[in-house]
Amino acid sequence: MIIQLCGLSGAGKTTLAKAVEKELTIQQFSVEVLDGDDYRKTLCSELGFTKKDRLENLRRIAFVAGRLSKHGIVAIICAINPYEEMRQEIRKTYPNVKTVYVDCSLETLTSRDTKGLYKKALLPQGHPEKLNNLTGVNDPFEAPLYPDLHINTEQQNLIECTQKMVQFILNSFVSPVKNLKPVSVLNPNSARQIVDR
């Protein structure tokens, strides 16, 4: 199975993916989180942020996800994944692909701004530190019209989002999965709004 997350920077994709990985591991599943930031430092290091490069970045990550999925590993693609055409391409290329929209308002993301990206994107034109290609601000993001799962990290905390996604994944397997353990309750200190690292 391949889970392709999509959502703006800071929406909580990485935090959620890692929490889901932990929960599924408890259920005796093999899981791999394919984080877009990590791949941009390695396999996709020469790619920029043009649309062409963004699409190629996702193609490479999806290829790795496809190989993992073929061997029974739940592959979670953790990237902004802004274009519907690419999300559909991944669905058509590989079997059992699910799209999960990790949603959060731009207002909340701007206030969180864990990486300082929104501050740079909102600088005046001509400012030397202005970021001109931040998805959702000055670069397009096409929200999926019909995601398989919609998670709003602004309205639900990490425990709720994790349980929702884990249950969705367990319910999505074609054959019944036996001897499942109940979804564990995460550390109560994690019951807060999700913040991307």
Image: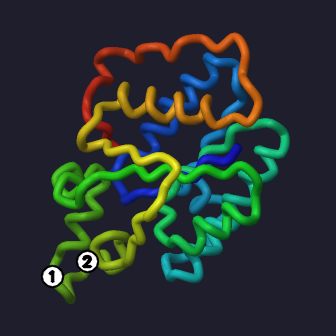
How packed mark 2 is, by other alpha carbons closer than 10 Å (few <14, some 14-19, many 20 or more), is: some
Does 166 sit above or below residue 51? above
The numbered mark, 1 or 2, whose residue comes first in the sequence reads 1
Residue 161 image position (x, y, % from top left): 39, 34
Does 109 sit above or below residue 193? below
Classify residue 188 as left or right of residue 144.
Answer: left
Do callouts 1 and 2 mark residues in contact (Cβ within 8 Å)? Answer: yes
Classify residue 123 as left or right of residue 175.
Answer: left
Q: Secondary structure at mark 2?
A: loop
Residue 196 image position (x, y, % from top left): 36, 45
How packed mark 1 is, by other alpha carbons closer than 10 Å (few <14, some 14-19, many 20 or more), is: few
Using the numbered discs, state the Cα–Cα distance from disc 1 to disc 2 in whole angstroms: 7 Å
Q: Secondary structure at mark 1?
A: loop
Image quadrant for the C terminus? Answer: top left
For image coordinates 69% across by 34% down, the residue present is 173
Residue 66 image position (x, y, % from top left): 76, 53
Classify residue 194 as left or right of residue 83.
Answer: left
Check disc 1 and report the residue beneath it: 124
Which disc number belongs to residue 171? Answer: none
Q: Quadrant of residue 177?
A: top right
Residue 197, visible in the rendered structure = no
Check disc 2 and report the residue beneath it: 130
Classify residue 93 as left or right of residue 33.
Answer: right
Image quadrant for the N terminus? Answer: top right
- For badge 1, the amino acid type reads Pro
For image coordinates 29% across by 63% down, the residue present is 117
Residue 136, visible in the rendered structure = yes
For image coordinates 20% across by 65% down, the residue present is 119
Residue 186 image position (x, y, % from top left): 41, 17
- For badge 2, the amino acid type reads Lys
